[in-house]
Image (tube, rainbow, N blue to C red):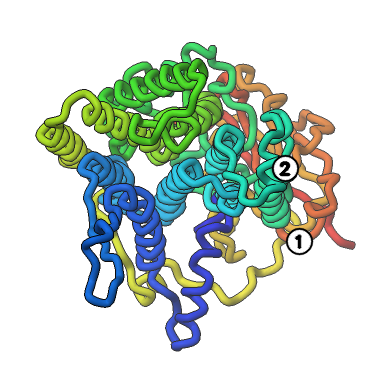
């Protein structure tokens, strides 16, 4: 269930699962564990933004208690209270997130929801650090940023952005010296502070998190750069996706402009949901490329209003940064600046841009594009919207003394915008579905026995189910022998790979030559050694795997049966090839 993600969510759930076992329960409720994480981040959001809205002021000295103690009163900063309420709305009730939480919430949902809230926690950490720069806070933030990739690979981009902006905040607004020696050291130039050992330690902590992710990926999948997407086994209806995640695929070669237009349309210009139309349909969103690609858009995310607001935030952030660079003095927090350093909107906008840019580059050419992948942008977009919101509220407070009614109008507008987005949001996967442990056992029976020892070959007409491995032979019709664009087989201790092939009746195989056949064991691409013509077909032979981990035990073999340029021709129809026999080990004498 967590194969194509990191170990972050399982590690969060580990103490809860352990407590359930202690009390004799089979498992701890998944949704409750996720809800506790959401509650923790909600507390972080409240403590970060509400502290500026409420402050304690000392009563003048002549107003003391009979015991002689000076009293304090609670003062409310109206502008900061409005800012905090807007931040809560954007962070905790962000419309695309709520729409997702109203969908089926299958096993893919939990890491994405945790990703959003962890990204929000990083934003709060940056704001707290900018207000009160402390090296301890900086180091903890770098460590948390490094661990983000364990939750979801794309959080690595957010971690990198966090370390860069946190280091910039510490350089531009260093902690105030406490001792005389520190005050003397405070005269050191900015260039020396950049190379401070504390900054280097923060980078090292972030790198350690990335190293842990690399090592766990290597232990789980055989490569530190692999997250399981090239190894997972799905369903027969998306064999072109199996092909694309393991071999070359057409969208890899789409021009940059066309790919950019598609990504923008997927983010902000969704036309309809494709839940019932197939993953390879056209017309899902504006700007969609005609080139085949797996597009899974089962719920709505953003629209053009988000594009306008996020773009405006980035522009204002750039303008405020330019003003700050030209300024020769540090401004106060009331003017919209955080501490003595960068403006808050500059910090949030830069973090948003630094995280969004590599995300956009990553999704420009991936073989799969989905609405849940668009939620990877949600922490970056929320940060940009928070920056725009705080700048607008604080600017209104500067422009007029009677700003309370304008603030109320702005807050109602923000809440109305998000509520309308939630109300108009669509989901084609139905409402959330929860299962008890007993229902889960009935849906997915647990297998305690080991699969039977595998033979040396599979032949057309034989039953692969008797070997006890689900999805064995996926993409191969065992009765007719016809192959899809890709096929999955489980083999044991492969010494070679040999395919006995024939042409389907009435098919012209010259258009899909045998040279298009490719084979992989795990992540290793096998070398094709020969193509031999026989009386009733052909024999295509591949050398055995060279990597030792693929030479012993049960292994997964993936076949590609057509060239990438012909992939779209066989999305819903079988290829012209019939697989009569698949062998991987010589018969023992």
Percent across and percent down for residue 428 are: 26, 42
Mark 2 lies on residue: 200
Vertical order, 483 against 308 (above or below)? below
Q: Secondary structure at mark 2?
A: helix
Few, some or many C-alpha atoms within 10 Å of disc 1 (few <14, some 14-19, many ≥20)? few
On the image, the x and y values in percent for residue 134 come to 57, 49
Residue that appears at 47% across and 21% down: 324
Alpha carbon distance from label 2 to label 1 = 44 Å
Residue found 49% across the figure and 43% down from its top: 126
**In the image, what residue occupies the spot 24% across and 67% down?**
64
**Residue 383 horizontal/vertical position (percent):** 39, 36
In the displayed structure, does residue 100 sit left or right of residue 19? left
For residue 553, which numbered disc appears in the image? Answer: 1
Q: Does residue 461 appear in the picture of this structure?
A: no
Which is more toward the observer, 49 or 178? 178
Cβ–Cβ under 8 Å for marks 2 and 1: no
Give the structural element (helix, strand or loop) at label 1: loop
Horizontal side of residue 177 vs 574, given as left or right: right
Horizontal relation, residue 39 to residue 328: left or right: left
Q: Residues within 10 Å of mark 2 (few under 14, many from 20)?
A: some
Q: State whether residue 493 appears in this view.
A: yes
Which quadrant of the figure contains the C terminus?
A: bottom right
Nearer to the camera, 298 or 446: 298
């Amino acid at each position: 269930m967590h194969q194509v993600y990191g170990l972050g969510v399982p590690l969060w759930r580990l103490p809860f699962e352990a407590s359930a076992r202690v009390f004799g329960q089979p498992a701890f409720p998944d949704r409750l564990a996720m809800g506790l994480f959401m509650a923790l981040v909600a507390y972080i959001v409240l403590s970060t933004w509400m502290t500026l809205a409420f402050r304690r002021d000392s009563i003048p000295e002549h107003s003391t208690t009979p015991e002689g103690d000076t009293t304090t009163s609670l003062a409310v900063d109206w502008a900061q209270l409005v800012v905090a309420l807007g931040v809560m709305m954007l962070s905790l009730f962000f419309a695309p997130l709520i729409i997702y939480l109203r969908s089926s919430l299958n096993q893919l949902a939990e890491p994405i929801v945790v990703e959003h809230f962890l990204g929000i926690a990083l934003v709060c950490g940056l704001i707290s650090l900018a207000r009160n720069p402390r090296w301890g806070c900086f180091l903890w933030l770098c460590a948390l940023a490094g661990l983000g990739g364990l939750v979801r690979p794309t959080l690595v981009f957010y971690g990198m952005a966090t370390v860069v902006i946190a280091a910039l905040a510490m350089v531009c607004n260093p902690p105030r010296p406490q001792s005389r020696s520190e005050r003397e050291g405070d005269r050191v130039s900015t260039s020396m502070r950049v190379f401070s050992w504390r900054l280097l330690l923060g980078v090292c902590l972030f790198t350690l998190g990335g190293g842990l992710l690399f090592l766990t990926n290597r232990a789980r999948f055989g490569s530190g750069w692999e997250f399981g997407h090239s190894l997972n086994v799905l369903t027969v209806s998306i064999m072109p996706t199996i092909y694309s995640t393991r071999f070359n695929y057409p969208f890899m070669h789409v021009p940059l402009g066309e790919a950019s237009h598609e990504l923008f349309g997927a983010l902000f210009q969704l036309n309809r949901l494709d839940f019932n139309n197939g993953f390879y349909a056209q017309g899902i969103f504006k700007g969609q490329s005609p080139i085949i690609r797996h597009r899974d858009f089962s719920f709505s995310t953003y629209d053009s209003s988000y594009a306008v607001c996020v773009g405006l935030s980035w522009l204002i952030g750039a303008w405020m940064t330019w003003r700050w660079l030209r300024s020769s003095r540090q401004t106060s927090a009331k003017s919209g600046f955080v501490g003595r350093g960068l403006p808050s909107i500059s910090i949030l906008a830069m973090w948003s841009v630094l995280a969004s840019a590599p995300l956009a580059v990553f999704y420009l050419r991936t073989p799969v594009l989905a609405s849940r992948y668009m939620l990877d942008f949600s922490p970056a977009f929320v940060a940009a919207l928070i920056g725009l919101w705080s700048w607008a509220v604080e600017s209104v407070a500067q422009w007029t003394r009677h700003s309370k009614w304008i603030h109320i109008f702005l807050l109602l507008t923000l809440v109305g915008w998000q509520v309308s987005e939630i109300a108009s949001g669509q989901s084609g996967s139905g409402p959330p579905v929860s299962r008890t442990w007993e229902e889960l056992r009935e849906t997915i029976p647990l297998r305690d026995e080991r699969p039977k020892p595998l033979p040396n070959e599979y032949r057309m007409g034989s039953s692969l189910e008797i070997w006890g491995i689900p999805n064995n032979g996926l993409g191969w019709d065992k009765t007719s022998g016809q192959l899809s664009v890709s096929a999955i087989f489980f083999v044991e201790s492969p010494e070679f790979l040999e395919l006995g092939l024939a042409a389907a009746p009435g098919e012209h195989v010259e258009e899909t030559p045998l040279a298009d056949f490719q084979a992989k064991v795990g992540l290793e691409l096998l070398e094709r050694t020969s193509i031999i013509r026989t009386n009733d077909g052909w024999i295509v032979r591949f050398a055995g795997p060279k990597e030792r981990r693929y030479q012993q035990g049960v292994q997964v073999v993936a076949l590609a049966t057509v060239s990438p340029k012909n992939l779209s021709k066989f999305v819903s129809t079988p290829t012209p090839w019939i697989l009569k026999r698949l062998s991987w080990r010589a018969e023992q004498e």
